[in-house]
């Protein structure tokens, strides 16, 4: 069942999520264990990462005992490309905290053996003990990660073809939709469902329709995010406009 948390604005929402992440990191450190975080990219989590950086700088939150796995990466983009998700994570979070670089993982967009690289990514997650908390955004197609419909709980890390709506939505980052890659490597829906806790963030009225479908319609491969209803510990953290079409709040 999806637990709903509706906040008046995204600033309030990200403070709550960042506090949860900080508590997890500190609890794992007290146990002598690494916290394993699954991270997302795009505009949605940017304020969350800014708040985590603030907690590091002002309240001493250390990321030295944290391992991270990112959801996805564009196929054909290397880590030095300014639209790659490795580049994004370095500039939004990793360069500003004390995380150990070798403990940060992003799918390889340049892998020649894509299937082998994807399988190795799954192996690395398992070797780390699984993901404690996975941060998600949601696309207007219902994608989580880059799991475009149809995609269901049997899917694992793999290369996918990006929906044209997704490419248009991401065109502003590239300056031209023609520059947006047609493929990406993404964790699968099944990989996400394996995470011990999932926190999905959504802001603005433009996400209200797909949030409602994900929460209220029966789980379906046509809306990959709807499979999160089957997760035992999934939170949708929303601002008021993103929650506007929900029957329950």
Image: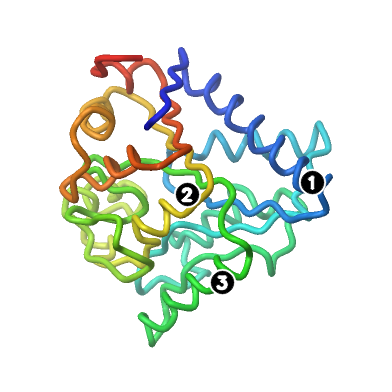
Residue 238: which quarter of the image? Answer: top left
Residue bearing the label numbered 3: 124
Check residue 62 in the rendering and tell me which mark sits there, or answer none: 1
Local secondary structure at mark 3: helix
Of marks 3 and 2, the one in the foreground: 3
Residue 53: which quarter of the image? Answer: top right
Q: Looking at the picture, does residue 31 appear above or below residue 12?
A: below
Q: Is residue 128 left or right of residue 63?
A: left
Depth check: give the residue in front, 60 or 173: 60
Residue at x 61% of width, y 25% of height: 15
Local secondary structure at mark 2: loop
Residue 30 x, y percent position in the rendering: 84, 45
Residue bearing the label numbered 2: 40
Q: Label 3, label 1: how many angstroms apart (C-alpha)?
A: 23 Å
Residue 23 x, y percent position in the rendering: 71, 35
Please say if the residues under marks 3 and 2 sit with CB atoms less than 8 Å apart.
no
Which sits earlier in the primary sequence, circle 1 or circle 2? 2
Residue at x 58% of width, y 31% of height: 17
Q: Label 1, label 2: how many angstroms apart (C-alpha)?
A: 20 Å
Q: Label 3, label 2: how many angstroms apart (C-alpha)?
A: 17 Å
Residue at x 47% of width, y 16% of height: 7
């Amino acid at each position: 069942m999806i637990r709903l948390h509706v906040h008046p604005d995204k600033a309030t929402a990200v403070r709550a999520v960042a506090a949860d992440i900080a508590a997890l990191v500190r609890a794992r450190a007290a146990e002598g264990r690494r916290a394993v975080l699954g991270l997302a990219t795009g505009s949605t989590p940017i304020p969350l990462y800014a708040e985590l950086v603030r907690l590091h700088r002002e309240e001493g939150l250390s990321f030295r005992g944290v391992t991270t796995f990112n959801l996805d990466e564009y196929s054909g983009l290397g880590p030095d490309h300014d639209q790659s998700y490795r580049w994004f994570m370095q500039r939004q979070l990793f360069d500003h905290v004390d995380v150990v670089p070798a403990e940060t993982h992003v799918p390889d967009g340049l892998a020649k053996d894509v299937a082998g690289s994807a399988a190795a990514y799954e192996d690395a997650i398992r070797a780390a003990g699984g993901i404690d908390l996975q941060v998600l955004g949601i696309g207007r197609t219902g994608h989580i990660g880059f799991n475009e419909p149809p995609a269901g709980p049997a899917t694992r890390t793999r290369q996918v073809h990006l929906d044209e709506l997704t490419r248009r939505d991401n065109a502003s980052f590239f300056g031209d939709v023609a520059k947006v890659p047609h493929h990406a490597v993404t964790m699968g829906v099944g990989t996400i469902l394996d995470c011990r806790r999932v926190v999905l963030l959504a802001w603005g009225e433009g996400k209200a329709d797909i949030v409602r479908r994900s929460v209220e319609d029966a789980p379906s491969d046509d809306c990959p995010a709807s499979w999160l209803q089957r997760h035992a510990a999934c939170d949708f953290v929303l601002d008021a406009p993103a929650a506007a079409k929900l029957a329950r709040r």
